[in-house]
């Protein structure tokens, strides 16, 4: 049987990858130069927050892809983390710096290594550049042929040895316990050296950053150090993560005076909230920041732009990118040609776009592009399967039936639970799994019955689940309720309704 035109369009239809690192060159064509992006690209923003899947790594990747343009503005971009694969900080999990102070020393040393490597490779030959490069070479801290992971390890070992000795003399130092020479020859210290130490060639890391900044200024250049994937780098231990990230932000603030050296930090909003929950005095000084947020028009724009990347779809609807992207109304018009305007029959039912947004939203009421893209790709797969099995095509020029979206959602639910919540918070999995086939709205009393614990403990667990976005907290302070978002219901078989203590 000859394949229908509609089935042909569906079989070729892709909405892209869920993860920015997998997008490749296509990412540039999807991307919209929003005000947030323009601020980042102009150099006005250093810290970018966003929920998981909100697009932080997309911005990171785009900065790297637009390196030639930035170089035209005399800005060099240096990635401090591997874009894909194992994180550069993977080996720190087995032997991490034990304190925030030591971690700050590691960050400063590592970043100085990256800046020094740039000065060396770019052939800067002024006095300040020579001072920086010589200090790094003398201490075997030049990058050379090292990988980023090897450079992190070298920096970590240097700082560890430095802090274990009680004096640094450029050639001889003593172990604080045995008082025996260690053979450590370090000449870079984290603080400012004494006059005597300076006379022996010892130099402070702050002095070297200042020299590097002057060298860059003399040559009319600036450097941006990009730091991403922090949720992966230190995920093994909450304490390790807290030490590492608090030290990173203190390092960021310490380096602000070096205006030609900028850190660009991409961090999940929930991780930032977690590391500052116990107080972080320096947080108020972090002002060059933005938080990535997605509203209804931006989600619509994302969907339509990705749909228009498929030429068979463009031909099927006889449209052009220019005409469709001219206005929000034009984007919505195409969306409503592809999908039913409403998720269910009836004028009081939610519109399909709003249904997609609400079904991919977590308990913090945030809809991330990652789940939207996943839902769309799964819906394509469901619809193709239906037509291959001989079901009727969607009416008119619609590509998707209402049922296709609903049947696709449980797969999105499963992946979100297993690859995000269970992967990142394995200790909470039993509490979540215990809610299978329960009602969507729970109280501390009903949760206490389900989890077989007292209400005080149930409240504590529920609060944690709300903090990670599994629950949406409702009710009042004195009568709290916990609502399970649609995003998690499909895989868990959650039933719409309010739990009653008498039913459990």
Image (tube, grey):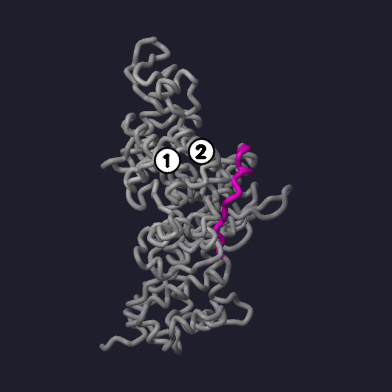
> Which sits earlier in the primary sequence, circle 1 or circle 2?
1
The residue lying at 58 percent from left, 48 percent from top is 467
Q: Is residue 291 magenta?
A: yes
The reply to whether residue 12 is visible in this rendering is: yes
The residue lying at 49 percent from left, 34 percent from top is 206
| Mark 2 Cα shell of 10 Å, populated few (<14), some (14-19), many (≥20) | some
Which one is in front, 501 or 235? 235
Query: Under tag 1, what secondary structure?
Result: helix
Q: Is residue 136 above or below residue 66?
A: above
Query: Under tag 2, what secondary structure?
Result: helix
Name the side, left or right, on which 277 lies relative to 491: right
* Percent x, y of residue 356: 52, 70
Which one is in front, 161 or 479? 161
The answer to which image quadrant residue 314 occupies is bottom left
Q: Quadrant of the N terminus?
A: bottom left
Residue at the top extreme, as displayed = 179
* Percent x, y of residue 75: 43, 54
Mark 1 and mark 2: span between their CA atoms?
10 Å
Specify the segment rendered in magenta.
279-294
Q: Which residue is mark 1?
A: 111
The residue lying at 42 percent from left, 24 percent from top is 202
Name the side, left or right, on which 479 lies relative to 410: right
Q: Is residue 487 magenta?
A: no
* Percent x, y of residue 165: 41, 18
User: What number is the disc on residue 251?
Assistant: 2
Q: Check whether the beta carbons of the residues at disc 1 and disc 2 lie within 8 A of each other.
A: yes
* Percent x, y of residue 198: 45, 23
């Amino acid at each position: 049987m000859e394949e229908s035109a509609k089935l042909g369009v569906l079989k070729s239809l892709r909405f892209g990858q869920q993860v920015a690192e997998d997008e490749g060159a296509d990412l540039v064509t999807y991307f919209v130069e929003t005000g947030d992006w323009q601020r980042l690209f102009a150099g006005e923003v250093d810290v970018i927050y966003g929920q998981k899947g909100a697009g932080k790594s997309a911005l990171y990747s785009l900065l790297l892809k637009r390196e030639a343009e930035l170089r035209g503005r005399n800005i060099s971009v240096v990635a401090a983390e591997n874009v894909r694969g194992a994180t550069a900080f993977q080996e720190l999990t087995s032997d991490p710096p034990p304190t925030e102070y030591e971690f700050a020393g590691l960050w400063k040393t590592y970043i100085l290594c990256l800046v020094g490597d740039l000065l060396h490779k770019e052939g800067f030959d002024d006095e300040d550049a020579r001072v920086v490069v010589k200090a790094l070479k003398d201490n075997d801290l030049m990058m050379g042929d090292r990988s980023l992971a090897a450079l992190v390890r070298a920096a970590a070992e240097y700082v560890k040895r430095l802090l274990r000795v009680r004096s640094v003399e450029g050639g001889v130092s003593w172990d604080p316990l045995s008082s025996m020479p260690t053979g450590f020859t370090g000449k870079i210290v984290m603080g400012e050296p004494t006059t005597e130490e300076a006379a022996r060639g010892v130099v402070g890391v702050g002095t070297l950053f200042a020299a590097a900044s002057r060298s860059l200024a003399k040559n009319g250049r600036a450097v941006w150090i990009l730091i991403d994937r922090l949720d992966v780098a230190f995920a093994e231990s909450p304490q390790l993560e807290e030490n590492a990230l608090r030290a990173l932000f203190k390092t960021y603030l310490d380096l602000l005076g070096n205006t030609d050296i900028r850190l660009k930090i991409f961090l999940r909003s929930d991780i930032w909230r977690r590391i500052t929950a116990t107080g972080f005095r320096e947080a108020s000084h972090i002002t060059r920041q933005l938080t990535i947020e997605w509203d209804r028009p931006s989600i619509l724009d994302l969907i339509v732009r990705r749909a228009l990347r498929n030429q068979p779809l463009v031909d099927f609807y006889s449209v052009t990118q220019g005409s469709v992207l001219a206005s929000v109304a034009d984007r919505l018009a195409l969306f409503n040609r592809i999908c039913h305007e409403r998720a269910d029959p009836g004028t009081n039912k939610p519109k399909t776009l709003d249904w997609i947004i609400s079904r991919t939203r977590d308990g913090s009421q945030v809809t991330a592009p990652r789940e939207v893209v996943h839902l769309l790709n799964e819906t394509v797969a469901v619809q193709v399967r239906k037509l291959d099995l001989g079901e009727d095509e969607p009416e008119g020029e619609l590509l998707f039936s209402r049922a296709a979206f609903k049947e696709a959602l449980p797969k999105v639910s499963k992946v979100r639970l297993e690859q995000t919540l269970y992967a990142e918070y394995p200790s909470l999995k039993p509490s979540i799994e215990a809610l299978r086939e329960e009602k969507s709205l729970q109280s501390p009393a009903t949760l206490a019955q389900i989890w077989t614990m007292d209400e005080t403990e149930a409240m504590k667990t529920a609060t944690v689940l709300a903090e990670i976005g599994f629950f949406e907290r409702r009710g009042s302070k004195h009568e709290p309720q916990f609502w399970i978002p649609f995003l998690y219901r499909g895989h868990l078989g959650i039933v719409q309704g309010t739990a009653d203590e008498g039913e459990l």
